[in-house]
Image: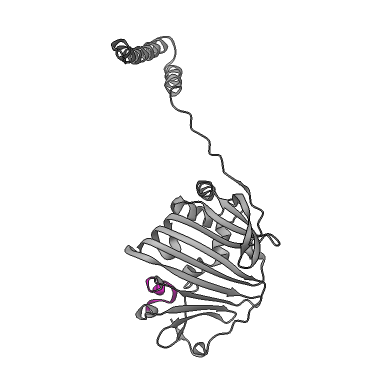
Amino acid sequence: MNTNQRLLRPGLVVLLLASMLLLGYYLGSTGTGPSAAAALAAVVNSFAPTPTAFVPIGQPIPIKPLTGLTSLNATVQINANGLLNGQRVQGGLTATVATNGKDQTQINVSGPLLGDIIAQVGGSAMSLFTPSQIQIYKVPQGTYVVVKSLFDLCIKPKAANSTEAVERMSPQTLLGMFTSPEVARGTLVGNGTVNGTAVKHYVIDGPTFLAAAQRSSDPNLSDFGNSLWSAQNADLYVSTATQYPVAFQGSYSGQFDPLKFEGDFDVRIDVTGINQNVQINLPASCKNPISQ
C-alpha cells in the first residue's frame, strides 16, 4: 500500500464524521428536536449491518406420535459428562420401558449414574442403598418402586410426583419433544433397517431444532430448548410402513432438568415393540411395601 492510500483512508473517515456532524447541526437548527434526532438516527442506523433472518433447514417429517399407541416397549440410553447436583459426573443411565393397554407400566433403570438420582425417585430411604437397578411400576393400585440390591425392597411413595424425574426420561416424553411437529424437520438421507423394521433415515439440523424448540408453544419443549446451549445434528429413523419413530439419537449441551444435570449429554431411544400388550405383574416384594 503506498503512502497516498494510507493517508486517504483516515481522511475518508474524518470526512464522513464531519458530514454527520454538519447534518446533525443543520437538522437541529432548521427542524424540531425529535424529528432532527430521528433523522440523524436514521443516518447512523443506515451504516449498521442488516440482521440475517433465520432459515430452517429441512422439510417437515411425516411422523405419528407415540401417544396414540395402546402398548409400547422401548429403551432409552443417556450418557452424560458434566455436573450433577453440582458434582462432577461422567456415566450413563439405561431405562427399559414396557406399557400395556391395562394402564400398567414398568420401567427398569440401571447404569453408573443410578446412585446419583436414587433419592429423587423414592425419597431419603432409598439413598441408603447402592442398588444395581430400580424398577418402577405404575398400576391401577398406585406407584411402586423396587430397589434391586442384596435383597429386593419395595417402596410405595406417598408423594404423587416421586417418580416424575424418571418418567420425564420415558420414550414417550422424550420422543414427544424431539419429534414434535414444531421441530420435526429434516433431510431424508436414505432407507434402511433398524430393530428389524424398514425405515426412512432423516437428519435433523441441530440449530434448526434448537431455534424451533425455543419458540415452541409447548412449555415443556420451550423450557428444554431454552435450557440448552447447543444441539448437534440428530438421526431419526421412521417406520416406512407405520410412520412411527423407530429410533432416535442426538447430542446436546446445556441443562437437563430431570437429572438436575448440566454439561454434555447424548440421548438414544429405540422403540423395540409396538402394540404387543405385554403382561406386567408386581413382584412378590410389593405385597407388603414400605410406605415412604
Measuring 49% from the left and 61% from the top, which residue is drawn there? 267
192 shown above or below 274: above
Residue 11, image quadrant: top left
Which is more toward the observer, 101 or 178? 178
Magenta span contains residue 122: yes
139 shown above or below 203: below
Q: Is residue 224 left or right of residue 66?
A: left
Which is more toward the observer, 2 or 210? 2
Measuring 63% from the left and 63% from the top, which residue is drawn there? 193
Q: Give, as a single range, the part of the protein colored magenta.
A: 115-124
Provide residue 4's location: percent of width, then percent of height.
Answer: 31, 10
Q: Is residue 186 left or right of residue 253?
A: right
Magenta part, dominant SS? helix
Residue 217 appears in view: no
Residue 267 appears in view: yes
237 shown above or below 35: below
Magenta span contains residue 78: no
Which is more toward the observer, 209 or 138? 209
73 shown above or below 281: above
Measuring 44% from the left and 83% from the top, which residue is drawn there? 148
Tell me, what colour scheme is on the image? one colour
Provide residue 37's location: percent of width, then percent of height.
Answer: 42, 19
Q: Quadrant of the N terminus?
A: top left
